[in-house]
Image: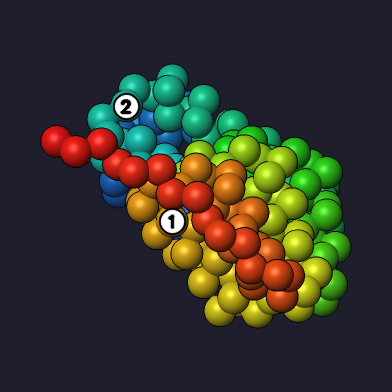
Amino acid sequence: MAVYVLTACSVTAALSAQSRLESRVPAPVLAAVGPTIDSARAAGLPTGPLEDKVLEGVTKQADAGRIAAAVRRLAGELAAAREAFGDRATTRELVAGAGGLRAGLTRGDLVRLRAARPGQNTALALEVATDLITQGVPSDTATRVVLKVLGAGASDADLEQLRMAVERDIAGGVPAAVAASVRARVLSGSPATTIPITPRPQN
């Protein structure tokens, strides 16, 4: 009976996803992405992010080949994130891990960030590390900075504060890596350091 219920739930989820895409996605795109989404579902990966990627591609009027390639890439990143985090990782953690890998984090970085918050959700820490990278902080520095504040017991609010403070410093002319490193020292309770600010050119 348990096997039957599990199978029925799986079929229901598959039909729901199919109907969600069928009404909004051209047939050639459905045919191109279907095998990847089916394989991801069979592997126990969340398919919602893959469906969102399909819809994003359709909205941008990308062709079926490009959309299928993007979906395959994301499926691979989700699988790699799950390998790093384990089977109990949440969808948000897997999506954040996939985004981190795309931005330049390594599988080892994901493992370390996960280990720094045992028993807690790692998604925000991953998102902050990824955001730092997109702001120009080197990936190894971003990982080190987030690990430093996590090691000091940073809360989610502290992580958000780190992200906003670094963004503010960079906007004020502070080099990205310097801003991230100094803010991490402040949040982790290390002695404060003066942030060198480079005057912005006048128009």
Residue flagged by tag 1: what amino acid is it?
A: Asp
Question: Residue at coordinates 51% horizontally, 62% vertically from top-left?
Answer: 163
In the picture, the quarter occupied by the C terminus is top left
- Secondary structure at numbered mark 2: loop
Q: Which quadrant, please, contains the N terminus?
A: bottom right
Task: Please give the residue where the numbered disc 1 appears in the rendered image.
Answer: 169
Q: Which residue is mark 2?
A: 62
Left/right of residue 9 with respect to residue 54 in the rendered view: right
Residue found at x 68% / y 45%: 141
Q: How is the image coloured?
A: rainbow
What's under tag 2, amino acid-wise? Ala
Lower sequence index among marks 1 and 2: 2
Labels 1 and 2 touching (C-beta < 8 A):
no
Q: Residues within 10 Å of mark 2 (few under 14, many from 20)?
A: some
Return the x and y of residue 167 as percentages of the image width and height.
Answer: 43, 56
Residue that extends furthest to the left in the rendered view of this protein: 203
